[in-house]
């Protein structure tokens, strides 16, 4: 079950690539790139503690290509060379708190979202990985307000 709330916009700086949900290997490669790149050090003190994974620049719905950016929330839209800045706009989001072994629990939640009946906006969706609990992720899905 989710609740819907309005959230202000923000920026995330990190590694980024255009991917598709039907190519999980490419998504895995991006996560490996993130893990092997010291993104937080390149951002500096402005980086959030939590890791953000933003799904944006959708080419259509969830089965079409989209850009995935993994990094940290920052105060300004400045990215050093080799990093990408994703803008998450002010929007209404459905919020899902996911607990359990990762990434299996997160994948199951996204599959439920894809098979559900949310009126998605496809502007920007994102996951927030808890900095202190590796089994806690908050999923935020942009929706069209009713």
Image: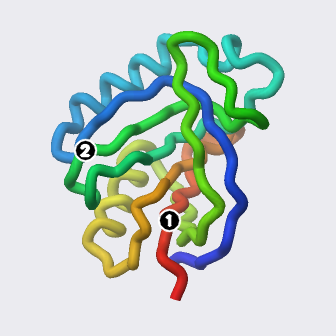
Query: What residue is at 39 percent from the left and 78 percent from the top?
Result: 119
Query: What residue is at 53 percent from the left and 49 percent from the top?
Result: 127
Left or right: where 33 falls relative to 46: left
Above or below residue 76? Residue 103 is below
Q: Quadrant for residue 105, please give it.
A: bottom left
Above or below residue 125? Residue 120 is below
Label 1 Cα crowd, 10 Å radius (few <14 / some 14-19 / many 20+): many
Residue under numbered circle 2: 65
Query: What residue is at 39 percent from the left and 20 percent from the top?
Result: 32
Residue that protrudes farthest toward the left in the picture: 22
Mark 1–mark 2 contact, CB under 8 Å?
no
Query: What residue is at 62 percent from the left and 36 percent from the top?
Result: 12
Q: Position of residue 19 (x, y in %)?
A: 28, 36
Above or below residue 12? Residue 100 is below
Q: Position of residue 65 (x, y in %)?
A: 25, 44
Q: Name the element at disc 2.
A: loop
Q: Name the element at disc 1.
A: strand
């Amino acid at each position: 079950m989710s609740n819907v709330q309005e959230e202000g916009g923000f920026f995330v700086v990190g590694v980024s690539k255009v991917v598709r949900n039907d190519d999980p290997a490419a998504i895995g490669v991006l996560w490996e790139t993130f893990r092997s790149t010291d993104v937080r050090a390149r951002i500096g003190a402005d980086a959030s503690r939590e890791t953000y994974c933003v799904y944006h620049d959708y080419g259509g719905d969830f089965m079409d290509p989209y850009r995935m950016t993994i990094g940290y929330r920052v105060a300004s839209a400045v990215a050093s060379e080799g990093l990408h800045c994703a803008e998450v706009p002010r929007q209404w989001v459905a919020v899902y708190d996911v607990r359990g072994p990762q990434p299996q629990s997160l994948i199951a939640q996204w599959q439920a979202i894809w098979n559900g009946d949310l009126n998605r906006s496809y502007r920007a969706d994102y996951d927030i990985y808890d900095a202190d609990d590796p089994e806690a992720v908050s999923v935020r899905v942009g929706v069209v307000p009713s």
